Image (cartoon, rainbow, N blue to C red):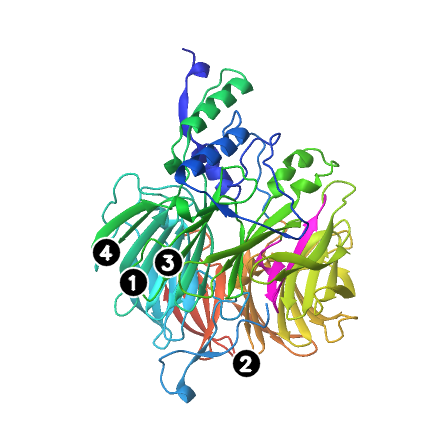
Amino acid sequence: MTPQGRVRRRSATAATGVLVGLVLAGCTSAPQRPAPVDPGVPGGGFRLVAFDSCAEALKGLRTAARAYVGPWGFGGPGRADLTGGGAVPAMAERAAPGAGAPDAAPTFSGTNTHEAGVDEPDLVKTDGRRIVTVNGGVLHVVDPATRQVTGRLDLGTSTDDAVRWADVSLLLHGDRALVLVSPQWAARPVGIVPGRPGPTTPLPEGTPTGPRLVLVDLAGQPRMLGDYRIDGGLVDARQVGATARVVVRSAPRLEFPSTDEGSDADRTAANQAVVDRAPIEDWLPRWAVTGAGRTSTGTVDCGQVTRPATYSGTSMVTLLSFDLGATTLDDGSPVTVVADGDTVYSNGANLYIASDQRWRMLPALQERDSDPKPEDQRTEIYQFDITGPDRPRYVTAASVPGWLINQYAMSEWNGHLRVATTSGRDWGLRPKSTSSVHVLRADGGTLRETGRVTGLGPGERIYAVRFVAGTGYVVTFRETDPLYTLDLRSPDRPKVLGELKIPGYSAYLHPVSDDRLLGIGQDATEEGRRQGTQVSLFDVGDLARPTRLAQHHVRHGNSEAEFDPHAFLYWPAERLVVVPVTAYDPGGRGAPDTGALALRVSDAGFQPVGTVRHSQSTSDHLGAGTIRRSLVVDDVLWTVSGGGLQANSLSTLDTLAWVPTT
């Protein structure tokens, strides 16, 4: 047999690079065979229903998946990642719980979150008494008072454990930390020896190799209390009080034959035969949890799986719930929808999961001036009630035209969900895109559109959104940056109040007072060529006439805060803005200049305070000296990089201490 005729085996997920990093977990067919969309009522709700039995679920999933499998399985050549990249400022002063008398309690900054009271996972956390971070798979606890490492826990089993290079984030509650590990590729799972902070023991074969959640006890020396794994990829998580909600998406575990011989029709038929033979267990995500001296395994219950009217059977999104005050982890009380999910938003009472459908536009992308079909440009949004600590209750779902830039494109206020989207073609010589804001009534039973604003930024796309109570701010960009101000106080009559056109754009917007809005983004020429990081201060006291009061420009720079708001710090007590910035030599002759830029905000503009740099980092790890986060504890500015943490005076930026974590 020739090499070309040799048959290989491959998994459905591995064959597509875990479905392009699981960003395209719902991208379930070759570009010429897009999965269906049920448009329903524009902006209106549609109903999810449960399967009557596991047998019915298997029949439905096989039928749906069979229709959309192609010669390349659930993927195909030419697939691409098309992912795009609040009420009050979340960085308010708070007293650290249990830190002494109220007048002596330290003040500290938390993670920069979308909604106050709803925490989001990040690579560093503090409660004012301790700073917790994970670097290279090792959890470190730093005492901000003594500026020393007081606890250390290795989460890995070897030097090549996936946790060494995985994306790792944290949630914190009292003396508990939940570590969320999102491996870049599958690795053999490991369990824990309860009560032991050191080596780990293997879990049984067949244990899921997707996201890993580790519950850590921080009282005394850190130790692992529970280790949880589930099939799929981590989407995001939210925390209210002691309850953490974790969103995971997964693809069926099917082994498709792959051969270089035969026609597309032959290979498609062979793949369909695999689908026809697959048991229900191949679709249901598996989970495994180790803690309290034992390991439990299982799969998501068919009775907790719901489906929309149309679905491809090639992706599931699962919402898990964990009590961070418990002594170990449990099965997570999974609730699963036969759908996809990319963006998570929560206001504390409700949690929304949005499914990005931009991959459906791949055929149009292959022709520069081809217009995507309207049915290929919709975002599905699923609403869950999370008011209690128990299993979330699915409420309803809706479909809106266009796609979201990120979670800030959604916001619930006064019983209405506001959603900002971009539709149409924003590429090619004659772009035809436009952006809109849809207002949906979230009445506990349906998501029905009550009003919309359309026609924002013709030929452009959204770069930033911020909703503040009854006001909306939307930034679109192609060559210039229109900042739109919207009046959303009347859900049935939303309207544009003002527009400001300036060069460049803001990628993140942050309210710093009732009439001041701060933007982080890029300066640009009149032709739209990016010139480096800019921090803008807008006067929005008169929403009909917004103006830019000041701009601070870092030539040839960029900032992680432009695409990850967790990298942004605003400390109201000092009116201090801190963002990481890396400035590059355009000629490539020198090393990039990296640091954390500190600016003091006045009503009229910015006063540069200085730049913090991690020059003491001795790690040879790439990017070890690049600052990624900033936080405040007791009038000390802490910055975090891959090499360690540095303490600087909040008023003078003088270096006070260096705490290595490598």
The label on residue 573 is 2
Q: Earlier in the sequence, mark 3 or mark 1?
A: 1
Front residue of 211 and 304: 304
Cα–Cα span, label 3 and label 4: 16 Å
Front residue of 130 and 364: 364
Q: Earlier in the sequence, mark 2 or mark 1?
A: 1
Instruction: Residue type at mark 3: give it.
Output: Val
In the rendered image, the residue lying farthest to the top is 1
The residue under the point 37% across, 75% down is 129
Instruction: Residue type at mark 2: give it.
Output: Ala
- Whether residue 156 is visible: yes
Q: Is residue 532 magenta?
A: no
Q: Nearer the viewer, mark 3 or mark 2?
A: 3
The label on residue 568 is none
Question: Which residues are the magenta region?
Answer: 405-425
Instruction: Pinpoint residue 37: horizontal percent, then vertical percent.
Output: 61, 41
- Element marked by disc 2: loop
Q: Nearer the viewer, mark 3 or mark 1?
A: 3
The residue under the point 43% across, 59% down is 245
Q: Are marks 4 and 1 in contact (CB under 8 Å)?
A: no
Q: Quadrant of the N terminus?
A: top left
Cα–Cα span, label 2 and label 4: 41 Å
Instruction: Residue type at mark 1: give it.
Output: Arg
Cα–Cα span, label 2 and label 1: 32 Å
- Element marked by disc 1: strand
Say which quarter of the image contains residue 451. bottom right
The label on residue 152 is 1
Query: What residue is pinned by disc 4?
Result: 198
Front residue of 487 and 45: 45
The label on residue 179 is 3
Residue 530 relative to residue 390: left or right:
right
